[in-house]
Amino acid sequence: GEDVEQSLFLSVREGDSSVINCTYTDSSSTYLYWYKQEPGAGLQLLTYIFSNMDMKQDQRLTVLLNKKDKHLSLRIADTQTGDSAIYFCAESLWTDKLIFGTGTRLQVFP
Amino acid sequence: DTAVSQTPKYLVTQMGNDKSIKCEQNLGHDTMYWYKQDSKKFLKIMFSYNNKELIINETVPNRFSPKSPDKAHLNLHINSLELGDSAVYFCASSQDRTRGQETQYFGPGTRLLVL
């Protein structure tokens, strides 16, 4: 089946690292994505990883993929207040559609 | 220079009315999508079109009818609006249909409230 799960909330102090986790069930996923949604705004693509990769780093963002456990994580180094948003992971299936996770609301406090 | 745009941004209407939401992309992409985000922020795909042809049609009431006059536009028409249709509707587009390799770019969303 197609199911993508995330924890609903994460609260971190400014300057710390944030780790947002995601688990998925469909092993046929080809690409996995992280999107950011700021309040009242649309979805912004942050980064993505091909399913045969283990890790991808892009400035403050590090994506880790454990395909055996079907687990994806997004690490944000030196988290800032501007990082406060809802973060969605999504998997891309061979049918072209994206299956989104439930979203994790990240709150950064000073 | 907006990549994916939607109009209107906000839509408040009465139950039973018919309304349309428009989407345009200037990225030269072949595929466009409509997603619905409910009050719990859950996102689900509704439709996708590739070069004006319907590709994905998830379990959506037939009151929802997408229309693609050309590959840069995908409009969503909703008949007989119901309270449960209240949500944020996102349009997205992607370069091509190469399986799983497209990246989808999203519009800002249309916030629909049915009273």
Image: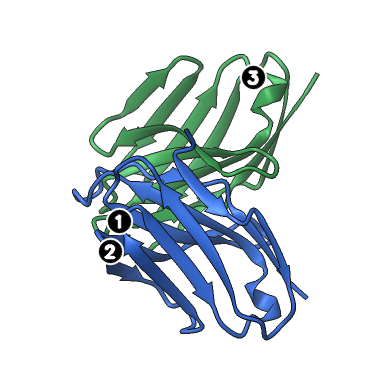
Report which colour depicts chain B: blue
Q: Are marks 3 and 1 in contact (CB under 8 Å)?
A: no
Image position of A100 with respect to A36: above or below: below
Q: Chain of mark 3?
A: A
Which of A62 and A34 lies nearest the eye of the viewer? A34
Residue A74 image offset from top left, x and y in percent:
49, 31
**Which one is in front, A5 or B42?**
B42
- Which type of secondary structure does the marked residue at label 1 adopt? loop
Query: Which mark's residue is nearer the viewer, 2 or 3?
Result: 2
Callouts 3 and 1 on one subunit: no
Number of residues whose C-alpha sits closer than 10 Å to that of mark 3, classed few (under 14), some (14–19) or many (20 or more): many
Q: Colour of chain A?
A: green
Give me the residue at 35% from left, 37% from top: A66
The residue beneath circle 1 is: B71
Q: Does dot 3 land on a helix, a strand or a loop?
A: loop
Number of other residues with Cα within 10 Å of mark 2, as a class: few under 14, some 14 to 19, many 20 or more? some
In the displayed structure, would residue B65 be above or below residue A43? below
Q: Earlier in the sequence, mark 2 or mark 1?
A: 2
- Say if residue A25 shows up in the picture: no
Q: How far apart are the two marked residues, 3 and 1, measured between alpha carbons?
A: 39 Å
Q: Position of residue B99 (x, y in %)?
A: 20, 51
Q: CB atoms at circles 2 and 1 under 8 Å apart? A: yes
Image mark for residue B52: 2
Question: Does the image show residue B33?
Answer: yes
| Residue at position x 66%, y 16% in the image | A16
Provide residue B69's location: percent of width, then percent of height. Answer: 34, 65
Q: Which three-letter amino acid code belongs to the residue tagged 2?
A: Lys
Residue at 44% in and 76% down:
B65
Dots 2, 3 in contact, CB < 8 A:
no
- Disc ID at residue A79: 3
Mark 1, other Cα within 10 Å: few <14 / some 14–19 / many ≥20? many
Position of residue B98 in the picture relative to residue B69 (left or right): left
